[in-house]
Amino acid sequence: MGYDITYISNMTLHDAGSETLTRAKGFLSVGHDEYWTDRMYDSTVEARDKGVSIGFFCGNSVFGRFQLLAGTNGEANQSFKRDGRLNDKDLIGSGYDEGIIGGGNWKVQDAHHWIFENTAMKNGDAIEGIVGWECHNGLSENIPNIKKLAFGPTNFYKWPTWENIKSGEHGEFVSTYYDVANTNAFVFNTATCWWVYAFDSPPGWARSTWYDCRQTPDLRAMKITQNVMDEMIRRSAT
């Protein structure tokens, strides 16, 4: 798509703090970014509040808190253990609640929002098969003027045997947007791990076949992504 992208690891964010984000025009969390340290979380909140826009192109993210531990040789940060959960909803917009595992269609509910410019999407239109493997569905109750851009039901396979037997509507996903108070920044949340399935597959990468998962690229999702990144650049210049 022609953007100058810098990649960082979770450990880079943990070690370097908010400065690794504030030097950029925006921050993208992609895929299934589930486990964060307190320092990662606090650094991202700090960067957001300093005016860095965030795109959460992911699902079940910023959920599990983990502690970094020394290895058997005493070297720091060589292992980790889970330690409760983080306040995912008040950073992302929506987060973990019951029924996050499943799949479905990304159904538009606020087509007049700038996120959807030049997509030709209308309320009720859907990007098929892009919601899954896990999603965000619990809406924050503490973010003023939060917007639900897309939401709808998810289907679920039998658990814990993981048989591919659909059991009907199981839960829901909620994609959100909010402007960050006293800044030019915004936070957009697709609420699904499978947003990347709307893009071309790299060589050797196999898509999931569960939940009627999307198998082909989708220009509408690409345009939404482009709109988000262009707006990050525009706002960072003002």
Image: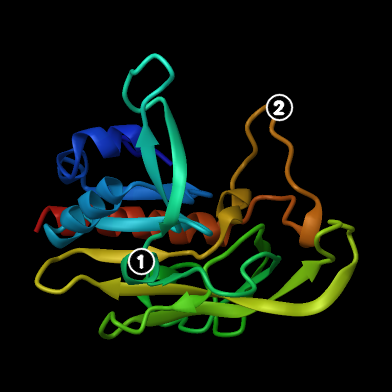
Which of the labelled discs sits on residue 87, or is there none?
Answer: 1
User: x, y (%) of residue 196?
Assistant: 57, 49
Quadrant location of residue 176? bottom left
Cβ atoms under marks 2 and 1 closer than 8 Å: no
User: x, y (%) of residue 162?
Assistant: 84, 56
User: x, y (%) of residue 50?
Assistant: 11, 57
Question: Which mark is nearer the camera, 2 or 1?
Answer: 1
- Disc 2 residue type? Gly
- In the rendered image, which quarter contains the N terminus? top left
Which of the labelled discs sits on residue 204, or is there none?
Answer: 2
Q: Is residue 217 left or right of residue 147?
A: right
Residue 9 seen in the figure: no
Q: Nearer the viewer, residue 125 or 58?
A: 58
The residue at 39%/65% (across/down) is 88
Residue 95 vs 150, above or below: the answer is above
Residue 89 vs 221, above or below: the answer is below
Residue 147 seen in the figure: yes
Residue 194 vs 187, above or below: the answer is above
The residue at 63%/50% (across/down) is 197
User: x, y (%) of residue 165?
Assistant: 90, 65
Judged from the image, the secondary structure of the residue bearing numbered disc 2 is: loop
Judged from the image, the secondary structure of the residue bearing numbered disc 1 is: loop
